[in-house]
Amino acid sequence: MRLASRMERLGTETAFSVLAKAKALEAQGREIIHLEIGEPDFDTPENIVEAGCRALREGQTHYTPAAGIPQLRDAIAADVARSRGIPVEREQVVVTPGGKPIMFFAITALVDEGDEVLMPNPAFPIYESMVEFVGGRPVFVPLRQERQFRFDLDEFRAGLSERTRLVILNSPANPTGGVLTPGDIAAIADILRDRPDIMVLSDEIYSRLLYDGAFASIAAEPGMAERTIILDGFSKTYAMTGWRLGYGVMPVWLAEAVAKLQVNSNSCTAAATQFAGLEALTGPQDSVGRMLAEFRARRDLIVAGLNALPGVECVVPEGAFYAFPRVVGTGRAASELADLLLNEAGVACLSGTAFGRHGEGHLRFSYANSRENIGKALERMGEVLARAGVR
């Protein structure tokens, strides 16, 4: 028996393998501080939990339309229209079990064998994985600390070719916490206007975890809404990672194709989960503000602490909940240093190379953990680096 050859092209998320190693150490009695997994450490707000439970009690235990229940699609359309300043209709919305299916479905629907997809690097690894899985060719635009992890627009322009079919944007970004400015977004739109054959997948899952300024979506640029797939969801904003609830907003012709792919894969998103999402969007938003304020305090703590470590330099992330310090001054490769910190300091983090080759020389820390644990992790890391002779 054998697997299909395409399976060799499918990647994974290193975060889950590091989590498994950390759990194995915990099983041996070690105390591990988890800064590797990108999920809020807050519980889902009670009003959202109650809405999900109420839906179950009221019999919402059956199939829904493949694209989602009408009430939720309408609420998403209204929310995206308000937050991005664009008209959105229900028919443009597809509700999925998490945000990843939008990546999977959009790339499957748009990218043929040999087509090129322009994307940031380092970046969320599933972009590259899915493009290679369908036979496409990833083309990378490096993100560098010197530019606050924003695109060099000349490199972006140079990365486009006659075979480019899709451009992927992610702002605020995983793993860097970098944010594309409104000027960046406008310039990218200007570049792409000369290429009406290119679609944009704009991963905006961290759009409400922005510390300063207003969020800018390329969909709001003139002429770009009909060429953009907005990926968003509930996992990060409402601490609903385990509920598996995301969505895409896209042109109707593509939404119909994506809904067809959903029929062929998982039929629909769980009914009760969708009603919980409806409450998340239409109910009180206080929890989002409180969570963001706490993330800001943690950000400031971890950035100051990382910059105090020998051989480490960290710019201030402008969004999401990740710090992406440069660690070349330690004299260790990123993967080697990540292993050292896990095994010797009991601090789980990720090598920047888990997000692509341009992540070498960096580590990613998720500060979705308590300030107490972050402080403890910084102290332990300092001790380990001192023992390793880093000055």
Image: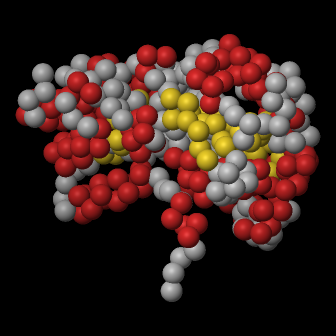
Work out which quarter of the rendered image holds the C terminus and state it: top left
Residue drawn where x is 43% and y is 21% of the image: 145
Residue drawn where x is 29% and y is 54% of the image: 22
Side of 32 where 65 appears, left or right: right
Q: Is residue 228 visible?
A: yes
Q: Is residue 240 visible?
A: no
Note whether 150 is above or below 374 in the view shown.
above
Residue drawn where x is 19% and y is 49% of the image: 343
Place residue 257 in its image quadrant: bottom right
Note whether 58 is above or below 163 in the view shown.
below
The extreme front residue here reads 162
User: Residue 158: x percent and y percent?
Assistant: 63, 25
Q: Nearer the viewer, residue 18 or 77?
A: 18
User: Residue 290: x percent and y percent?
Assistant: 55, 29
Side of 25 where 87 appears, left or right: right
Note whether 277 is above or below 27 in the view shown.
above
Side of 382 where 78 appears, left or right: right
Q: Nearer the viewer, residue 200 or 50?
A: 200
User: Residue 126: x percent and y percent?
Assistant: 56, 50
